[in-house]
Image (cartoon, rainbow, N blue to C red):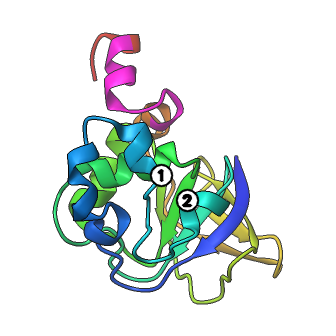
């Protein structure tokens, strides 16, 4: 079960908004790069996010380039899950690969500071502030295990295979 405070974003949040290109020189120092997570979409995001918080966004979250750094710095900033109406395909897979849950449900009724709960095993997102629940297809057991172990590399190290 994942529970956290919502940080709300709109449609078409690109990997360049998540991980601004002008900080590309920091890609070897992800801790420093994470200080600039979503800076171009919300200048105060990296300063106000707390461990366990959740990003909720509209359609096409993570569009643009396939840079894995975008998903990595979201996770490093303290975000425990990303919920969106839809994801760019490569960004979604990058999230799973690094152990960051990414869930697709309609998000129009979420707002900043709502409290959301996500249950990957049973396939639901609950907005505890507004008291509603949305279902999504349950994640396959192996994907849940990949997420629980911290990503694909950690899963393979632990299990010696896929």
Residue ID at (67%, 69%)? 6
Q: Quadrant of the C terminus?
A: top left
Q: Label 1 belongs to which residue? A: 35
For this view, does 71 lie left or right of residue 81? left
132 left or right, relative to 15: right
Disc 2 designates what residue?
46
- Around disc 2, counting alpha carbons within 10 Å, would you say few (fewer than 14), some (14 to 19), or many (20 or more)? some
Packing grade of label 1 (10 A; few <14, some 14-19, many >=20) is: some
Q: Is the C-beta separation of discs 2 and 1 under 8 Å?
A: yes
* Residue occupying the point 47% across, 31% down: 150
Residue under the point 39% across and 23% down: 155
Q: Name which quarter of the figure residue 44 lies in.
A: bottom right
Residue 156 sits above or below residue 15 on the image: above
The picture places residue 113, in percent across and down from the top left corner, at 74, 74
Up-down: is 37 above or below 129? above
Residue displayed at 43% across by 58% down: 36
Who is closer to the viewer here, 79 or 20?
20
Range of residues picked out in magenta: 147-157
**Residue 18 point in image, percent of width and height:** 36, 65
Residue 34 drawn at (x, y percent): 44, 49
């Amino acid at each position: 079960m994942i529970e956290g405070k919502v940080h709300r974003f709109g449609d078409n949040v690109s990997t360049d908004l998540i991980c601004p290109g002008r900080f590309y020189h920091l890609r070897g120092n992800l801790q420093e790069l994470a200080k600039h997570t979503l800076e171009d979409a919300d200048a105060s995001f990296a300063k106000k996010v707390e461990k366990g918080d959740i990003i909720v966004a509209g359609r096409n979250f993570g569009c643009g380039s396939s840079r894995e750094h975008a998903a990595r710095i979201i996770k490093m900033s303290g975000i425990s899950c990303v919920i969106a109406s839809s994801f760019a395909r490569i960004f979604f897979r990058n999230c799973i690969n690094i152990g960051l849950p990414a869930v697709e449900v309609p998000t129009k009724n979420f707002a900043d500071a709502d409290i959301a709960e996500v249950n990957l095993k049973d396939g639901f997102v609950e907005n505890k502030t507004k008291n509603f629940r949305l279902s999504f297809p349950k994640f396959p057991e192996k994907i849940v295990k990949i997420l629980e172990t911290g990503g694909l590399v950690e899963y393979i190290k632990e299990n010696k295979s896929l």
